[in-house]
Image: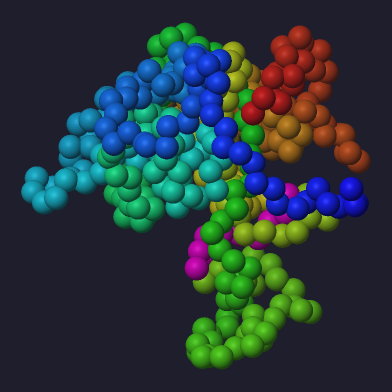
């Protein structure tokens, strides 16, 4: 046989199934898809799935907010998408790091787990991403997201999961929805729109120094330029501030401010005051070395709060001395603060 002759087409005689194949238990694909099916979505979700606990906690908190939702909407008109569903959808976006609300809405069309979490059946149509934008202002105006967070904190406290006296604070940069091109000199008049602007000459920043004192975003004026570290690129950001209790590492408060050089320390008195209003009694407060300044440490001691922050000894003396660092509680706070 010549080399390569095996590729020639051959006609094989018709083959009939054997007796063994007729009784085989091999599964076969049915090309005819069922037109009608009765499916219990809850039965499709594993009993130990972590979202089950999250769903129960979220549903209880949202039930408490039902009177608030009633006051948000007019008596007449077309029924809206349930606000509970939008808040729970935001939870899913955060928990699963979904890149955008539009991407989430696309996945919602076929994702059974998401539909179960939101209380939707198999045939119920999803919603458009614009729904988030249209309802966000209404939810923010009534501070519904904050109340939702507070209800979850109250539930965790009721279950005995929160520390009453020991906390940790930390800050993080949150990138703003403002492009670098939107940062314009504050004294410069807005340029007239050009129909054809090749190369974007009106936004050429080469050789130009930019700072928060001289430039501002035209789309989000409250955003600030900041770096995550030395040598890092400056980005348009806000600053988030988290207050965590030290027993189980749960957040009990979260605030967003402008990203200034002292924002991390400036917001701490507000966080402590709100914690006391909720019934907590802060005794110690952990943090990184960014909080190790004499003014801040003195302010904490004046509030009867012991600062368990990391010592900053880089070319300077720390404001935290041996009276604090010698206690076992200080070492525990330093270990636990890395959870946040």
- Tell me if residue 164 can be seen: no
Question: Is residue 54 positioned above or below 84 on the image?
Answer: above
Q: Is residue 318 left or right of residue 99?
A: right
Q: Is residue 325 left or right of residue 272?
A: right
Where does residue 283 sit, x and y in percent of width and height? 59, 17
Q: Is residue 107 left or right of residue 32?
A: right
Whether residue 211 is in magenta: the answer is no
Question: Is residue 214 positioned above or below 145 on the image?
Answer: below
Whether residue 224 is in magenta: the answer is yes
Q: Nearer the viewer, residue 220 or 275?
A: 220
Which residue does the image show at 86% across and 52% down from the upper left?
4
Magenta segment boundaries in residue numbering: 219-228
Which residue does the image show at 57% across and 72% down from the upper left?
182
Question: Is residue 260 positioned above or below 307 on the image?
Answer: below
Which residue does the image show at 69% across and 19% down from the upper left?
336
Where does residue 19 sit, x and y in percent of width and height? 53, 16
Count of picture labels: 0
């Amino acid at each position: 046989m010549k080399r390569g002759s095996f590729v020639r087409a051959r006609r094989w005689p018709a083959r009939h199934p054997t007796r063994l194949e007729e009784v085989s238990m091999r599964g076969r694909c049915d090309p005819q898809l069922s037109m009608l099916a009765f499916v219990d979505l809850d039965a499709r979700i594993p009993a130990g799935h972590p979202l089950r606990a999250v769903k129960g906690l979220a549903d209880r908190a949202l039930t408490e907010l039902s009177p608030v939702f009633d006051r948000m909407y007019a008596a007449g008109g077309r029924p809206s998408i349930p606000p509970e569903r939008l808040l729970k959808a935001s939870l899913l976006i955060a928990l699963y790091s979904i890149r955008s609300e539009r991407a989430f809405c696309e996945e919602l069309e076929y994702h059974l787990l998401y539909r179960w979490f939101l209380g939707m059946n198999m045939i119920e149509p999803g919603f458009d991403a614009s729904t988030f934008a249209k309802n966000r202002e209404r939810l923010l105006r009534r501070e519904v997201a904050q109340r939702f967070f507070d209800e979850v904190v109250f539930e965790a406290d009721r279950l005995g999961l929160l520390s009453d006296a020991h906390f940790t604070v930390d800050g993080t940069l949150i990138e703003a929805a403002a492009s670098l091109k939107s940062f314009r000199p504050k004294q410069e008049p807005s340029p007239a729109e050009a129909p054809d602007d090749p190369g974007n000459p009106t936004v050429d920043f080469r050789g130009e120094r930019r700072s928060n004192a001289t430039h501002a975003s035209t789309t989000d004026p409250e955003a600030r330029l900041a770096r995550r570290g030395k040598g890092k690129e400056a980005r348009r950001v806000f600053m988030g501030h988290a207050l965590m209790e030290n027993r189980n590492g749960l957040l009990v408060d979260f605030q967003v401010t402008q990203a200034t050089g002292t924002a991390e320390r400036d917001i701490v008195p507000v966080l402590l005051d709100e914690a006391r209003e909720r019934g907590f009694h802060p005794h110690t407060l952990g943090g990184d070395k960014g909080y190790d300044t004499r003014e801040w440490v003195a302010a904490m001691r004046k509030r009867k709060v012991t600062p368990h922050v990391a010592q900053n000894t880089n070319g300077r003396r720390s404001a935290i001395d041996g009276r604090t660092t010698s206690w076992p509680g200080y070492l525990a706070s330093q270990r636990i603060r890395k959870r946040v």
